[in-house]
Image (cartoon, grey):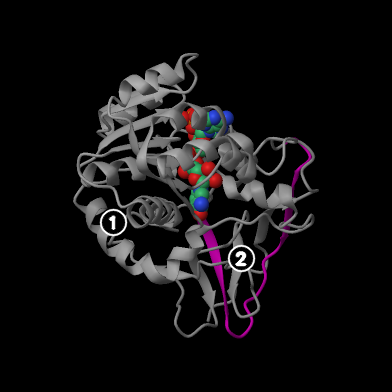
């Protein structure tokens, strides 16, 4: 094993405090430089290449799962620079959880894996960044919520919110492959155009329009059979009256509520708002947590989605931010719709 360069410094974003407000603010994060750690027995040191920006990271920070003083959590594509794990060698590419830092240890005694364990990546099989996007947690979330939970049938209408984002763009394309009519809901007109023109959705409505409900109803002349919920709030209110008998809903996220500082548990508020319609229409609501699908579905998902991505049946758009220093900025933008596609911070070049 070659030793890490002792003169090299690590760069990190540390959570300064439990966030006070609804959106990230100056003072929530601290930049620091520390010496590089040496991997112990059963550990490896990897340099971060791509860092994933995800809404759930904000939920962790606001709820206190992430403790002030710790390096911010984040899933990554990285490359092994020194290894004392027999199954990994220097130069191997990994999907892992380095967090918001340039280098990190993985392996024995490192508990940041959560439900996704380190996985070796083949750079010839797919672009490396897809491991934190369409071929990673986001893709599996779309697959699990749409295909496994909602079982869309040809001819049915599928509606998906945050349609141009990391999860939404995959949901809509999978629904098209299943033969459905697909209607997206997104913000900026450019996002709606992308969703219809580039991704092939049948229609897309902007939630920035005053008459969102009217426009959505016009885009769904046969109602909605499957709703993939990413947003909640006003967007959900527009979808609710369109739900058909025995419609299925995958309850993936409520990003419009993640910056709320009052108003109760968003899951409970959402359920209460929909309950009368759910009862009348016999709607099945499926709570979605991607971690519950990793063991049973990840291999099947990677095989199917890998083929779709390689042969171009599923495409994807990434929103890249250059440099670890920009992570808080990228994160904040993503939470407010300032991203266009899956948000990724490029921390270092793929090849050194
Ligand atoms: P996206 O790439 O979709 O980025 C977030 C998008 O949300 C923004 O681009 C914006 O799109 C939209 N948005 C933000 N605020 C609002 C608002 N107030 N009203 C309407 N839209 C808003 O993020 P992801 O693909 O990473 O995540 C999408 C959803 O999936 C999130 O709710 C996330 O929590 C959830 N998720 C859940 C998982 C699970 O296991 N259940 C796993 C992974 C993600 P626009 O500009 O178009 O409005």
Measured Cα–Cα span from mark 2 to mark 1: 29 Å
Q: Circle 1 is placed at which residue position? A: 305
Q: Secondary structure at mark 1?
A: helix
Vertical order, 40 against 314 (above or below)? below
* Residue 94 locus on image (x, y percent): 45, 66
Q: Residue at x 44, y 28 (%)?
A: 241
* Residue 305 locus on image (x, y percent): 28, 56
The single residue placed furthest to the front in the displayed view is: 280
Q: Specify whether 5 is left or right of 144.
A: right
Q: Tell me which label, 2 or 1, sits earlier in the chain.
A: 2
Q: Is residue 5 magenta?
A: no
The single residue placed furthest to the top in the displayed view is: 210
Number of the label disc, if any, that sits on residue 104:
2
Boundaries of the magenta span? 25-49
* Residue 88 locus on image (x, y percent): 45, 78
Residues 30 and 254: in front is 254
Vertical order, 144 against 204 (above or below)? below
Q: Residue at x 62, y 68 (%)?
A: 5
Vertical order, 2 against 9 (above or below)? below
**Does the rendering let one see residue 348?**
no
**Does the rendering let one see residue 151?**
yes
Name the quadrant containing residue 267.
top right
Q: Secondary structure at mark 2?
A: strand
* Residue 257 locus on image (x, y percent): 62, 36
Tell me if the residue at label 1 has its CB under 8 Å from ligand 1.
no
Vertical order, 164 against 347 (above or below)? above
Q: Residues within 10 Å of mark 1 (few under 14, many from 20)?
A: many
Name the quadrant containing residue 273.
top right
Q: Residue at x 67, y 59 (%)?
A: 9
Residues 156 and 291: in front is 156
Q: Residues within 10 Å of mark 2 (few under 14, many from 20)?
A: many
């Amino acid at each position: 094993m070659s030793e890490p360069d002792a003169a090299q410094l690590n760069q990190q974003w540390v959570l300064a405090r439990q966030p006070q407000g609804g959106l990230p603010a100056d003072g929530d994060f601290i930049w620091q430089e520390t010496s590089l750690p040496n991997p112990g027995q059963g550990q490896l040191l990897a340099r971060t290449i791509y860092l994933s920006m995800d809404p759930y990271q904000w939920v962790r920070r606001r709820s206190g799962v992430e403790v002030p003083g710790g390096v911010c959590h984040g899933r990554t594509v990285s490359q092994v620079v020194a290894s004392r794990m027999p199954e990994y060698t220097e130069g191997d590419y990994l999907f892992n959880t380095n967090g918001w830092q340039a280098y990190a240890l993985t392996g024995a005694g490192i508990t940041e894996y959560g439900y996704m364990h380190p996985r070796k990546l083949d750079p010839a099989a797919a672009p490396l960044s897809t491991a934190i996007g369409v071929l990673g947690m986001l893709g599996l979330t779309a697959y699990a919520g749409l295909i496994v939970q909602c079982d869309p049938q040809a001819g049915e209408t599928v509606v998906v919110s945050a349609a141009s984002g990391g999860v939404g763009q995959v949901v809509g394309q999978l629904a098209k492959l299943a033969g459905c009519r697909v209607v997206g809901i997104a913000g900026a007109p450019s996002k709606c155009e992308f969703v219809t023109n580039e991704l092939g959705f049948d229609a897309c409505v902007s939630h920035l329009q005053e008459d969102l409900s009217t426009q959505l109803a016009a885009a769904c002349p046969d109602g909605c059979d499957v709703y993939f919920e990413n947003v909640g709030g006003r967007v959900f209110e527009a979808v609710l009256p369109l739900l058909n008998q025995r419609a299925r809903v995958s309850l993936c996220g409520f990003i419009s509520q993640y910056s709320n500082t009052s108003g109760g548990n968003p899951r409970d508020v959402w359920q209460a708002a929909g309950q009368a319609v759910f009862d009348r229409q016999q709607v099945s609501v499926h709570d979605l947590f991607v971690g519950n699908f990793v063991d049973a579905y990840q291999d099947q998902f990677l095989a199917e989605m890998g083929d779709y991505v390689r042969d171009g049946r599923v495409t994807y758009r990434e929103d890249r931010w250059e440099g670890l220093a920009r992570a808080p900025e990228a994160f904040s933008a993503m939470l407010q719709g300032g991203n266009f596609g899956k948000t990724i911070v490029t921390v270092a070049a793929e090849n050194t």
